[in-house]
Image: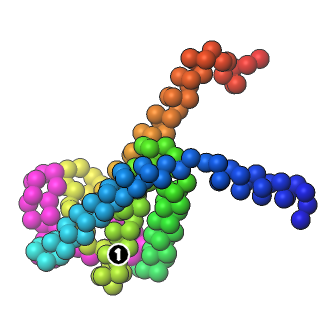
Amino acid sequence: MTARSKQFFNDVKEHFKLREYLWKYKLIVCLPIFCGLLTLDIISKQLAFNLLPYNVQVPFLDGFINFQLIINKGIAFGANADNLAGTIVGAVLITVLALLLFLYANQKVIIVGLIMIVTGGFGNLVDRMWNNGGVVDFLAWVLFPPYSIFNLADMWVTFGVVVIVIGVIISIIKYYREYQKEGIAHPEREE
C-alpha cells in the first residue's frame, strides 16, 4: 500500500472519529418517532386487513380519499409486481441506505426526514414478510390523477423526502447567509 493510500484511509478514519453524530438527538427524538410511526403503520394495516372488504371502495372523505383494501406485490402504483425478488431486494437496499445516511447525518431536519423514510421502508418490509411478499394498501387517492392506493408507510416515505428537501433548502439558505454576514465574496463571483 502506498503512502498516499495510507494517508487517505487515515484521513477517512479521522473524519469519522471527529464527526458530530448527534446520538443523543437521534435517541431522544428519532427513536420515539420511529416507534410511534411504525406502530401506527402496523396497526392501521391490520385493521384494514381485518375490517375492509377486498378491492371495494368504502367512502371515507368522499371525493378526496377513500378506503380500498388491496395486497400490492409491487412498488408504487403496483409497478414491478411480476418481479417480487427484485422488489424486495430494492426495498431492502433503499431502507439500508436510508439507515446508513441517518446514522451519518448531523443536521436535525434531515435526520428526521431520514428516520421517516427508514420507518416507512421497514414497515413495508415487515408487511411483506406477513403477506407473502405483498403490502397491505388501503388508502385510495381519488382527488385527481394519478389515482393510487397506498398505506401509512408510503406516506412516511413521501413526507420524509419532503422534510429532507426542506432541510436541504434551509441548509443552502444558511450557507449563503453566513457568506453575506461575514462579507466573504462567493467563490463563483470572484474574478
Height in image: 1 above or below 173? below
Residue under the image location 76 percent in, 51 percent down? 11
- On screen, residue 111 versus residue 42, left or right, reads right
Is residue 82 in view from this perspective?
A: yes
Height in image: 182 above or below 9? above
Who is closer to the viewer here, 96 or 64?
A: 96
- On screen, residue 11 versus residue 47, left or right, reads right
Residue under the image location 23 percent in, 63 percent down? 40
Who is closer to the viewer here, 69 or 112?
A: 112
Q: Residue furthest top?
A: 183
Residue 12: give x, y in percent of width and height.
72, 54
Residue 45: give x, y in percent of width and height.
22, 70
| Number of marks drawn | 1
Residue identifier under label 1: 126
Amino acid identity at mark 1: Val
Q: Secondary structure at mark 1?
A: helix
Residue under the image location 63 percent in, 14 percent down? 183
Residue 140: give x, y in percent of width and height.
20, 61
Is residue 165 in view from this perspective?
A: no
In the picture, residue 5 is in which quadrant? bottom right
Residue 149: give x, y in percent of width and height.
25, 63
Q: Quadrant of the C terminus?
A: top right
In the picture, residue 34 is in which quadrant? bottom left
- On screen, residue 4 versus residue 84, left or right, reads right
Residue 173 is covered by the magenta coloring = no
Q: Residue furthest front?
A: 24
In the picture, residue 116 is in which quadrant? bottom left
Give the colour scheme shown: rainbow
For the magenta stretch, what is the residue range?
A: 53-81
